[in-house]
Image (cartoon, rainbow, N blue to C red):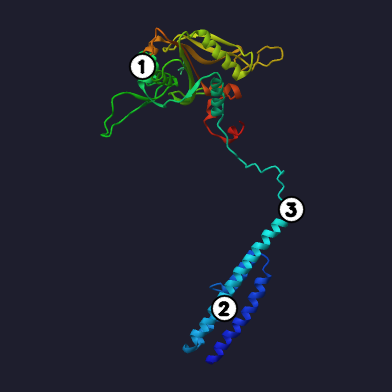
């Protein structure tokens, strides 16, 4: 092939490609088709232009700059036409959208599948806290890792009380920067009564406070889990009596199970209250038509379900928190949230609450 033949062949190739791309771009109905046509023409490996450019090899050195400039010119034309067509397609698509039927804003939205929600224990916690908040209680939180002092000593547990034993307490080793174990005993709190001590030591009466959160014990069976949740509530003021305690707990029982729910007190012992009591709520699950409870598994046919511990705050505890025991008195109560949730939803094993099986949790 002679030199001018090669230049001629390039000219002819570019002219043919020029016709081809103009009609291909014009025919492209959408962005993808346009991009395909563009790749067919300018694609590095298989593009039509690459074939034309291969002819460069046969072009004499003196004619090469001019031939190269023509090819570059051509490329620029192609790119400009490509961009212009791209814009036209976008404008066309937008005006088709605008001309099309409007969105129907009255259609129901699409609800995402598998949407999460609060755990049943936390739902129960919030419902319970709401009852106390409506009664005028402040909501506070306390630490889960606590000093022995606040968890046991200031609550008047005798030093050898079995609850402080390794049996049911998780002790925490605290080490200083030098790696040596620090003095002072620290544990995962075994109840939320620690908040009582902290709040009473830092506020002046009157006060009405509730606190909720995880607690830890070395306990593990059908109704016990090493971690569970409690709510603690207490009131300190002048002239507080057991009648006030009863009023608050009756309102609580009604808030939980509806008007007319009965409660009863049974004497019991907790070191930090005197007198102390356990409170049962009248079973709301005995639903036999004749009022009998022959088959009630919840109250085991007794008609009562034990739910909490309570009492009048021991004067010694007030003293430990620098509250004048001759002037002030108070009451306190505490209970497990899981137990209430299990009663509320008829859940047979506490384990179900902590296995995090979505088939279980999605029922709440
Ligand atoms: N702290 C007790 C427990 O974990 C529950 C309790 C009993 C709390 C009596 C109180 C109370 O405030 O007065 O078993």
Farthest-out residue, bottom: 2
Q: Which label sits on residue 153? A: 1
Residue lying at the far right of the rendered structure: 101
Label pair 2/3, CB-CB below 8 angstroms: no
Badge 1 marks a residue whose secondary structure is helix
Task: Name the residue at 62% across, 69% down.
Answer: 84
Report the front residue among 1 and 69: 69
Could you tell me residue 58's position as x and y percent? 51, 87
Is label 3 in a helix, a strand or a loop?
loop
Q: What residue is shown with label 3?
A: 101
Picture coordinates of residue 290, whole percent (x, y): 71, 12
* Residue 270 pos. (x, y %): 44, 12
Residue at 63% of width from left, 81% of height from top? 16
Residue 225 appears in the figure? no
What quarter of the picture does the N terminus occupy?
bottom right
The disc placed on residue 74 is: 2
Please report the residue visible at 49 percent of the width from the left and 13 percent of the height from the top.
310
**SS at mark 2 in the image:** helix
Residue that appears at 57% across and 73% down: 42
Crowd around label 2: few <14 · some 14–19 · many ≥20 (10 Å): some
Q: Is residue 38 visible?
A: yes
């Amino acid at each position: 092939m002679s030199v001018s033949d090669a230049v001629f062949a390039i000219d002819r190739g570019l002219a043919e490609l020029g016709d081809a791309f103009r009609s291909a771009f014009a025919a492209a109905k959408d962005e993808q088709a346009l991009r395909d046509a563009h790749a067919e023409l300018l694609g590095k490996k298989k593009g039509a232009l690459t074939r034309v450019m291969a002819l460069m090899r046969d072009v004499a050195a003196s004619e090469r700059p001019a031939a190269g400039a023509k090819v570059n010119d051509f490329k620029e034309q192609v790119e400009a036409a490509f961009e212009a067509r791209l814009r036209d397609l976008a404008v066309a698509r937008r005006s088709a959208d605008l001309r099309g039927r409007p969105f129907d804003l009255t259609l129901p939205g699409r609800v995402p599948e598998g949407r999460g929600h609060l755990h049943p224990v936390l739902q129960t916690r919030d419902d319970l806290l709401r009852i106390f908040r409506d009664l005028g209680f402040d909501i506070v939180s306390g630490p889960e890792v606590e000093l022995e002092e606040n968890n046991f000593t200031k609550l008047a547990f005798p030093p050898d009380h079995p609850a402080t034993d390794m049996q049911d307490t998780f002790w925490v080793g605290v080490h200083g920067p030098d790696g040596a174990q620090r003095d002072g005993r620290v544990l995962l709190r075994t109840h939320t009564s620690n908040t009582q001590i902290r709040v009473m030591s830092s506020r002046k009466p009157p006060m009405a406070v509730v606190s909720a959160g995880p607690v830890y014990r070395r306990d593990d069976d059908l109704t016990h889990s090493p971690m569970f949740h409690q709510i603690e509530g207490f009131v300190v003021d002048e002239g507080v009596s057991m009648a006030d305690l009863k009023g608050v707990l009756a309102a609580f029982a009604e808030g939980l199970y509806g008007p007319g729910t009965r409660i009863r007190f049974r004497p019991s012992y907790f070191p930090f209250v005197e007198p102390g009591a356990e409170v049962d709520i009248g079973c709301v699950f005995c639903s036999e038509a004749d009022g009998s409870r022959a088959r009630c598994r919840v109250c085991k046919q007794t008609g009562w379900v034990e739910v909490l511990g309570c009492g009048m705050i021991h004067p010694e505890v007030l003293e430990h928190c620098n509250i004048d025991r001759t002037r002030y008195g108070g009451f306190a109560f505490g209970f497990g949230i899981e137990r209430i949730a299990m009663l509320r939803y008829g859940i047979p094993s506490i384990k179900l609450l902590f296995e995090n099986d979505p088939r279980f949790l999605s029922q709440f």
